[in-house]
Amino acid sequence: MKLSIVVPVYNEERTLEEIVGRVLATPYEKEVLLVDDGSRDRSREIIARLADAHPGIVRSFLHAQNGGKGAALQTGFAAVEGDFVVVQDADLEYDPADYGTLLAPLQAGEADVVYGSRFLGRSERVHFRLHTLANRILTGFSNLFTGYRLTDMETCYKVFPAAVARSLQLRSRAFTIEPELTAAFARRRLRIVEVPIHYENRGYEEGKKIGWRDGVAALWAIVRFRFFP
């Protein structure tokens, strides 16, 4: 089993090297696809160094301009060569030590897709209250349209077969990629299982990028991508 770990990168010079180190330390055959989405800091320099240090394992993809998380994921999904895809943010909020937990339902044949939920009891730091409320509203609204019973639709940790990733025809360029992915899985009637993960949220002063405008866009995306993909 080979994992294709897709990492969207946008101005993550402070955490990029450490998170890639954690990913590389996981006990799996893997490829790490680093997709720089028009960073203006030293992220590209770090990506080049990591690719040189780990040839055949770390692969780099560079966008000339910032297109958004969805655009970066689409680039990565089109290039995966492993058996399963893991979406990994370039900050330190999500812990690669959870890969085993995420993969277990897939390996047991109990799921087609696995989401790592931040709300099932293993978070390390208290979530921002407004973010938690917004997430629950968006997840509940998504559940209404997809028929799933998820607790964390907006989670970064989504794991699914590489064949599914390569076949997805995605359109979202920004954070609306999360409801679009969930809607795409619902249209295919794929079974989603949630598992608890560790999560340590960061604040805006630490580089957090998602804001209230992304929440408003996600509400429309939930409707749009469920019925008008």
Image: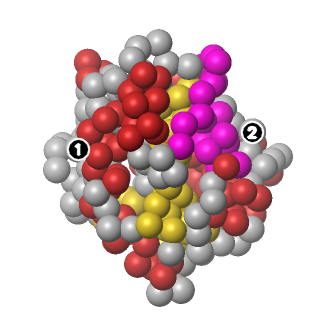
Q: Which mark is residue 200?
A: 1
| Side of 5 relative to 61 (left or right) | left
Q: Quadrant of residue 72?
A: top right
> Nearest the camera: 174 or 79?
79
Residue type for callout 2: Arg
Residue 206 is at least partly visible in this image: yes
Q: Is residue 104 magenta?
A: no
State whether residue 68 is above or below residue 170.
above
Q: Residue at x 75, y 63 (%)?
A: 187
| Side of 91 relative to 190 (left or right) | left
> Nearest the camera: 79 or 211?
79
What's the magenta region? 59-78
State whether residue 162 is above or below residue 110.
above
Q: Residue at label 2?
A: 171
Q: In x, y percent, where is residue 112?
A: 59, 74
Q: In x, y percent, where is residue 176?
A: 61, 37
Residue 119 is at least partly visible in this image: no
Residue type for callout 1: Glu
> Nearest the camera: 104 or 131?
104
Q: Is residue 77 magenta?
A: yes
Report how far apart the C-alphas of labels 2 and 1 lie in the structure. 29 Å
Q: Residue at x 48, y 82 (%)?
A: 107
